[in-house]
């Protein structure tokens, strides 16, 4: 039983089915689709207190709370969302949506293609950050929410929040972008490609149609997660956690893992391969690669962001070398050049990219203060 007064308690996801077709950025059409959704708190009478939380690569709609009968089932941002927490569910109606193409209930590669009666597999279309925003907007329409008090996300979720301010500038009061970037660097694209190659070259991948073979490309998924996990941590954080500490008393002088950091990465890879879908990983990393709002403006980010009307909070972390602070500052500078209302916090935290998921008093105080400001506007 969840007795924490600051927890939203036990939660249950709700499946929303959309029978109207959607044309994706790639040109493909999905005639129908499902979105798995969780909500916390209460929507006020004029439906002005809704906050959309956008998830990162391997997360889902399960933002906060717990599932009855499941140990260790806390939502991925449970430290941030709940009664009395920085995103206070006594004040706000919080929405988490599993993205199209993911593997936690929304329509994705493992879903049944109604035309064939078999999983989509390799035939599932490539999706983009804008595609996700378009489907989230349809959900908002269904819930009667014309404008979000705020849209917030970290990492890939931050890209979605930024895209919301561009795709629907009149429907976002505040855009909150945490540990994100206006586009991936060549190095980031390279990391994603190595991870994808680990998956697609796994003999069990079968061109993405491994469902029909009753197998899972676990070796590829395991490697992809290990590669990704290295980039989420800072060098200092890894040194502090593991250093060169051995698992035993001495070197084994074989090809097994001698060091604790090796064991940690192997554990993370094994765990990930047991619950995440390989096709989803490939799809979502492509969405990361494709995100670039300035692409249709000759690379001019200021021109790309000129349409935005929201007020902005942007947060970066000093040791995040995956999405470094200078990349966030590019967004800040482009917004300021457009004379937008911008608040920027650069947190000196040791935890690398994963810092946006962790409990850091300075970071959480920034978010708490900003949400207090939004709540005061609504009162």
Image: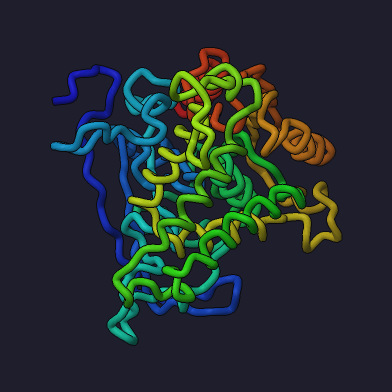
Give 42 or 194, whichever is nearer the viewer: 194
Q: Is residue 39 left or right of residue 194?
A: left
Identified at 42% across, 36% down, the residue is 49
Q: Position of residue 272 (x, y in %)?
A: 40, 47
Viewer-proximal residue among 145 and 279: 279
Between residue 275 and residue 166, name the one nearer to us: 275
Specify whether residue 151 is in view: no
Left or right for 13, reference 81:
left
Rendered image coloring scheme: rainbow
Please identify the quarter of the rendering in which residue 18 is found.
bottom left
Q: Residue at x 59, y 62 (%)?
A: 197
Residue 288 horizontal/vertical position (percent): 61, 54
Image point 70% across, 54% down: which residue? 190
Q: Quadrant of the N terminus?
A: top left
Residue 124 position, x and y percent, is: 46, 74
Q: How many marks?
A: 0
Q: Residue furthest top?
A: 361
Left or right of residue 334: residue 277: left
Q: Is residue 171 left or right of residue 328?
A: left
Q: Quadrant of residue 319?
A: top right
Residue 249 makes an appearance in the image = yes
**Residue at (34% x, 42% y) in the render:** 62
Question: Is 186 situated above or below 350?
Answer: below
User: As rendered, which of 9 and 342 lies closer to the eye?
Assistant: 9
| Percent position of residue 240, x then y | 57, 16
Q: Residue furthest front?
A: 253
Image quadrant in which you'd find residue 219: bottom left
Instruction: Please identify the quadrant where the C terminus is shown.
Output: top left
């Amino acid at each position: 039983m969840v007795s924490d007064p600051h927890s939203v308690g036990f939660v249950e996801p709700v499946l929303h089915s959309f029978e109207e077709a959607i044309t994706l950025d790639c040109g493909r059409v999905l005639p129908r689709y499902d979105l798995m959704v969780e909500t916390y708190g209460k929507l006020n009478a004029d439906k002005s207190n809704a906050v959309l939380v956008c998830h990162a690569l391997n997360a889902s709609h399960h933002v906060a709370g717990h599932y009855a009968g499941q140990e260790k089932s806390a939502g991925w941002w449970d430290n941030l969302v709940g009664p009395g927490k920085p995103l206070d569910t006594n004040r706000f109606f919080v929405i988490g949506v599993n993205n199209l193409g993911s593997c936690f209930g929304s329509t994705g590669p493992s879903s049944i293609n109604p035309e064939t009666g078999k999983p989509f597999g390799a035939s599932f279309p490539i999706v983009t950050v804008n595609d996700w925003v378009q489907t989230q907007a349809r959900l908002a329409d269904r819930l009667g929410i014309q404008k979000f008090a705020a849209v917030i996300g970290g990492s890939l979720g931050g890209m979605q929040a930024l895209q919301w301010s561009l795709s629907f500038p009149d429907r976002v009061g505040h855009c909150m972008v945490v540990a994100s970037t206006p586009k991936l660097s060549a190095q980031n694209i390279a990391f994603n490609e190595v991870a994808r190659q680990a998956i697609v070259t796994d003999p069990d991948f079968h061109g993405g149609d491994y469902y029909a073979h009753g197998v899972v490309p676990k070796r590829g998924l395991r490697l992809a997660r290990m590669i990704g996990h290295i980039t989420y941590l800072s060098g200092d954080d890894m040194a502090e956690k593991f250093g060169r500490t051995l698992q035993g008393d001495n070197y084994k002088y074989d090809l097994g893992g001698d060091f604790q950091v090796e064991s940690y990465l192997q554990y993370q890879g094994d765990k990930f391969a047991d619950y995440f879908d390989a096709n989803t990983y490939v799809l979502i990393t492509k969405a990361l690669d494709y995100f670039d709002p300035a692409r249709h403006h000759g690379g001019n980010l200021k021109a790309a962001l000129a349409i935005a009307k929201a007020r902005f909070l942007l947060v970066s972390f000093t040791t995040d070398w995956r999405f470094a602070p200078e990349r966030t500052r590019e967004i800040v500078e482009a917004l300021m050049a457009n004379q937008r209302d911008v608040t920027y916090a650069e947190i000196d935290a040791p935890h690398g990219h994963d810092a946006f998921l962790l409990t850091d008093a300075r970071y959480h105080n920034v978010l708490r203060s900003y949400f207090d400001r939004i709540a005061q506007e609504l009162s």
